[in-house]
Amino acid sequence: MPRQASILVGAPHTSNWDFLIMLAIAWRLGIDVRWLGKHTLFAGWRGPLMRALGGIPVDRRDPSSVVDDVLARVSRGEVFHLVVTPEGTRSGDGWKSGFYRIARAADLPVTLGYVDRTTMTTGLGPTLRLTGDVRADMDEIRAFYADKSGLRPELRTEPRLRDEDTAA
């Protein structure tokens, strides 16, 4: 893993277990991770625990501040690997683009992590530098994840940004 901040994509993300497995891989490899979670996970007594585990709360009513928050951390020199599950577990209509926007704005490398039920394997794939050619970058990501299924294959979403065609 790079010795600078980076993005660690966890996909396919077809259940919350996929996410926990990706975090376990990162912790096993000694990678200092942060992850994004809905703000309600940080309420009450869980807040300090979730933050200690690397969590960054996201208010889904206004997710636009997440990119700015992560960029501020990077600009302060904080070194971490942000675990992002752009697929979500409930959307079904494409990936969220936050990982792409953060990686481009902060010039961070993106490592493709995976959980594959078909082969019963998990791990880290290639590390990419996104070029800004959204379609070409996503074609490379799609090629990597083409044969990965996640724990609940029926919930897998094709790696495609919702605004990919207009952003290209």
Image (tube, grey):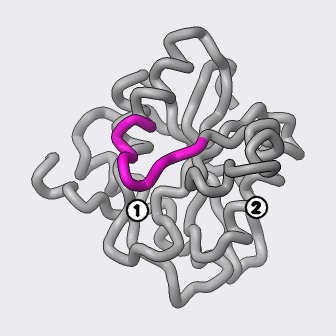
Q: What kind of element bears circle 1?
A: helix
Residue at (35, 30) in percent of width and height: 104
Look at the image and tell me whether residue 9 can be seen. no
Which residue is identified by label 2? 20
Mark 1 neighbour class, 10 Å CA radius: few under 14, some 14 to 19, many 20 or more: some
Real-space Cα separation, disc 1 to disc 2, in angstroms: 22 Å
Across and down, in percent, residue 127 comes to 55, 39
Query: In the rendered view, does 124 fall on the left or right side of 102?
Result: right
Q: Residue furthest bottom?
A: 154
Residue at (77, 76) in percent of width and height: 120
Residue type of the residue flagged with mark 1? Arg
Q: Which mark is residue 142?
A: 1
Across and down, in percent, residue 20 comes to 76, 61
Q: Which stretch is magenta?
A: 57-66
Across and down, in percent, residue 167 comes to 15, 47
Across and down, in percent, residue 27 comes to 84, 43
The answer to whether 131 is drawn above or below residue 114 in the figure is above
